[in-house]
Image: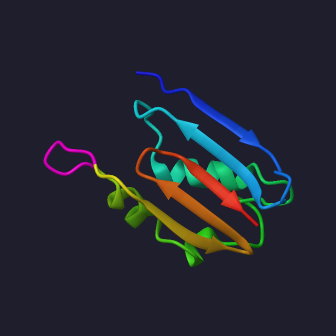
Amino acid sequence: MSRECVSSTERQTDGSVVYQSSSDSTSGDSLSTRVLMALDEIPGFDAEHGDTIVFDHIDLDALDDLFGPINESQRTGQVTFPVDGYEVTATADGEITIRE
């Protein structure tokens, strides 16, 4: 199955939202992969080759496990964590919001 990701990089009038994306639940990408891809969309932030090491801020395997299914039922909720002056929020539905 193919999963379509709808994303936008934007600054709202208050300047706080830097990136926001949502995706349907059929994607094969893990939540941690989508978080890394979202961070990489921020101008000047290079998740792969930059000075910031995302692993110093969040355990990506634990992030994937946090919202993984249990006994064939989906989890709900959200988690927010800081990464170099940004606040990253990821939800069980696959939504990612990055704020300054």
Residue sitting at x 78%, y 61%: 16
Task: Give the answer, above or below, for where 94 lies relative to 24.
Answer: below
Q: Position of residue 29 (x, y in %)?
A: 47, 40
Q: Position of residue 38 (x, y in %)?
A: 66, 50
Task: Give the answer, above or below, for where 83 lies relative to 70.
Answer: below
Task: Give the answer, above or below, for where 56 lies relative to 70.
Answer: below
Is 90 contained in the magenta span?
A: no
Splitting the image into 4 quarters, where does residue 54 fall?
bottom right
Q: Is 26 placed left or right of 74 in the picture? A: right
Residue sitting at x 78%, y 54%: 42
* Along the viewing direction, whichever of 21 and 47 lies nearer the viewer: 21
* Along the viewing direction, whichever of 85 and 61 lies nearer the viewer: 85
Is 73 contained in the magenta span?
A: yes
* Along the viewing direction, whichever of 99 and 84 lies nearer the viewer: 99
* Along the viewing direction, whichever of 77 and 5 lies nearer the viewer: 77
Q: Which residues are magenta?
A: 69-74
Quarter of the C terminus within the rendering: bottom right
Per the picture, the main secondary structure of the magenta-coloured stretch is: loop
Q: Position of residue 45 (x, y in %)?
A: 79, 60
Q: Position of residue 58 (x, y in %)?
A: 52, 72
